[in-house]
Image: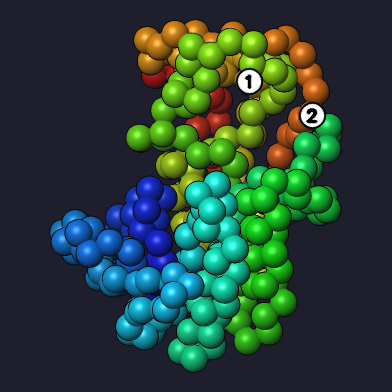
Amino acid sequence: MVISILGCGWYGTALAKQLVKSHTVKGSTTTAEKLPSLRAEGILPFLIDLSADGSRFADDFFKCDILIIAIPPKARSGEGEQYIPKLQTVVNAIERNAINKVILISSTGVYADLNREVDEHTDPQPVSSSGKILFVAEDLFRKQTGFKSTIIRFGGLVGPGRDPARFFAGKKNIPNGLAPVNLIHLDDCVGFTAAVLTMDAFGFTFNACTPHHPSKFAFYTQAAERAGMALPEFIPELKEWKIVSGVIADEVLRYEYIINNWFNWLNQ
């Protein structure tokens, strides 16, 4: 099977390294300097630029059985407005090359803090700019009839190169310290995606979030201790919050998380 991964960044490259063991994998990057490193991993590298000032890519990349889209909206850096036009360009390429199955990587950031547990049946009601953009992106793919899409909403990302200690180390008077965390490790991002492929689970929206939700205070304090960083100081209060569950994901995939207890992981 030929799998193309649009966006070989932190997650996309890790996924490609896993999938290349049993599939032909094509991977895209926006920087020419990264092409040799992808090739060295057995990934067929492509330089693809979907920027608003002109798309540049070879259609050979889109000649595949499954396309995985792992490009972020980059709303904080001011590129959010370009995201949906970029994805429309991708949709056009999907249709042009008759790809039947697509995975779009999204985020649990589409959910507002509703002060309750949320799952795939919940109306997300996004508040942040990136959450709003991602929800529009999801709808773009959900409404397509020429191919089947599965949307994976990842929780906050942690793992190699993304030590959670760095988020709050040394900071003081951090609000909402009793709010639960909604996170997922890179190993589970890869494992969850592989489960979708193995189960041929297309046409779904899945939440992918480790089913352990300690408070921000407990988790980030222990993370800072482990990293030898200055401890953060949280205000012991519970304001806006949510716990993200994957009800449909559990029913369809029955995926068992590799990291299922954050304190055990921090103590390794």
Which residue does the image show at 53% across and 24% down from the upper left? 262
* Alpha carbons under labels 1 and 2: distance apart: 12 Å
- Residue 63: mark in rendering: none
Q: If the image is split into quadrants, where does the C terminus sit?
A: top left
Residue 14, percent from left and from top: 35, 50
Res. 240 mark: 2
Q: What element carries label 2?
A: loop
Q: Is residue 53 left or right of residue 257?
A: left
Q: Residues within 10 Å of mark 1 (few under 14, many from 20)?
A: many
Kind of residue at badge 1: Lys
Q: Is residue 62 above or below residue 200?
A: below
Of residues 27 and 172, the one drawn nearer to the viewer in this rendering: 172
Mark in the foreground, 1 or 2:
2
Snapshot quadrant of residue 73: bottom right
Image point (58%, 35%), residue name: 183
Please state which of residues 22 and 119 is positioned toward the viewer in this rendering: 119
**Is 187 in front, or is 227?**
227
Residue 173 % position (x, y): 64, 11
10 Å crowding of disc 2: few (<14), some (14-19), many (20+):
some
Residue 53 falls in image quadrant: bottom left
Q: Mark 1 points at which residue?
A: 216
Residue 206 can be seen, yes or no: yes
